[in-house]
Image (spheres, rainbow, N blue to C red):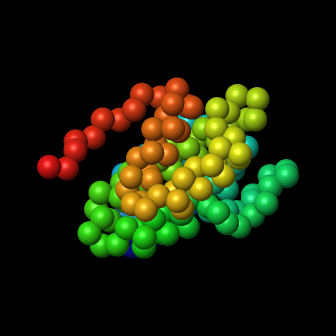
Amino acid sequence: MLRRGWTALAAIVLLGLAPAARAGEFVRADCRTVVKPTDAIRFDTDEHLRWYKRFWTGTCDHLSFCFSGSPNWNDIVGKLLAKGGPGEQPALLPKACRLGQLIGLEWAKDKDVQKISTKDLKVFNSMLEAAGDPLKGVEAVDAKARAMAGQPRVITSKKP
């Protein structure tokens, strides 16, 4: 009887901790509330997932011809938030996170089918760095990335 009680307690503890842990998630914690969880995304191959992870983290995980480090989207979001300041962060964060998922999923695809290349990532990064207003920079890159990926533009309300 006591053994069954310990087993039940252990199961409850493990079940209670499992959703919070999400050890496999590599997207920034503050982006996780606005993007689809990685484990809920359907990837074409395991390599597609590993390149997607590279996009967010800069980590090469058994990827050929991969250079680890920066830039990576987790770092880029941090730079955008710092550039935007506290007043712009509530509008900027979700847009930057969703943009990362859009670009990352497309860029991480096999080179024969991807619609966004590494060259495009460099152009996007330059656009973000050159934008005086990071929110406008994200919106400009979003429009360009959606056009390239063949996805409809998301209409957002204008500020009064």
Snapshot quadrant of residue 156: top left
Position of residue 58 measured from the top left corner of the image (x, y, whole percent): 67, 62
Q: How many marks?
A: 0
Q: Nearer the viewer, residue 47 or 140?
A: 140
Residue depicted at 41% across the width and 47% down the height: 139
* Residue sitting at the far left: 160
Residue 77 in sight? yes
Residue depicted at 55% across the width and 31% down the height: 149
Q: Nearer the viewer, residue 68 or 7?
A: 68
* Residue sitting at the far right: 65
* Above-or-below relation of 70 to 39: below
Residue depicted at 26% across the width and 69% down the height: 87
Snapshot quadrant of residue 84: bottom left
Position of residue 12 measured from the top left corner of the image (x, y, whole percent): 37, 64
Position of residue 102 measured from the top left corner of the image (x, y, whole percent): 51, 42
User: Where the N terminus falls, by quadrant?
Assistant: bottom left
Q: Nearer the viewer, residue 125 or 101?
A: 125
**Is 17 left or right of 121, judged from the image as shown?**
left
Residue depicted at 63% across the width and 49% down the height: 123
* Above-or-below relation of 111 to 131: above
Position of residue 82 measured from the top left corner of the image (x, y, whole percent): 42, 73
Q: Nearer the viewer, residue 144 or 99?
A: 144
Residue 18 in sight? no
Snapshot quadrant of residue 94: bottom left
* Above-or-below relation of 1 to 140: below
